[in-house]
Image (cartoon, rainbow, N blue to C red):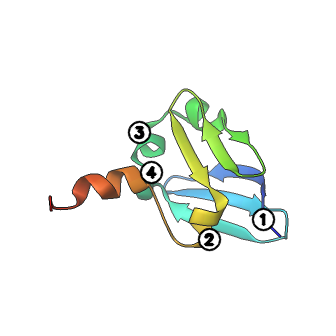
């Protein structure tokens, strides 16, 4: 059984997601630089799907599964790795 988002909101420092199983999870905006830099209107332009969250204008996708596993923006993390 997969868990899906039902609502998304923001405060000054966090992204908050209500899930269809009754939980609410939060993640620091620092995990998602595109969202952190976005305007309130851009943040509210989220598309909720069974698989996660998508912001077309920001080119940002967040999976609920990834959030539940404690993962933030994997693109930013991969750019911080030292070359092999």
Label 2: which secondary element: helix
Q: Position of residue 33 (x, y in %)?
A: 39, 47
**Cα separation between marks 3 and 2:** 23 Å
Residue on which the image places disc 2: 68
| Mark 1 vs mark 3, CA separation in Å | 28 Å
- Estimate the x, y position of residue 71 in percent, counting from the top left: 49, 66
Disc marking residue 3: 1
Give the Cα distance between marks 4 and 2: 15 Å
Badge 2 density bin: few <14, some 14–19, many ≥20, Cα 10 Å: few
Mark found first going from the N terminus, 4 or 3: 4
Q: Residue at x 66, y 32 (%)?
A: 45
Q: Quadrant of residue 17?
A: bottom right
Spot occupied by residue 7 in the image (x, y as percentages of width and height): 77, 51
Q: Which mark is residue 32?
A: 4
- At horizontal 78% and vertical 65% (from top left) the residue drawn is 3
Residue 66 lies in quadrant? bottom right
Residue assigned mark 3: 37
Residue 48 coordinates in the image, percent (x, y): 74, 44
């Amino acid at each position: 059984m997969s868990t899906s988002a039902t609502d998304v909101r923001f405060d000054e420092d966090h992204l908050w997601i209500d899930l269809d199983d009754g939980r609410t999870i939060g993640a620091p905006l620092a995990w998602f630089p595109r969202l952190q830099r976005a305007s309130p209107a851009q943040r509210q332009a989220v598309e909720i799907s069974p698989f996660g969250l998508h912001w077309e204008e920001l080119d940002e996708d967040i999976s609920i599964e990834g959030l539940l596993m404690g993962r933030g923006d994997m693109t930013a993390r991969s750019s911080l790795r030292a070359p092999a």
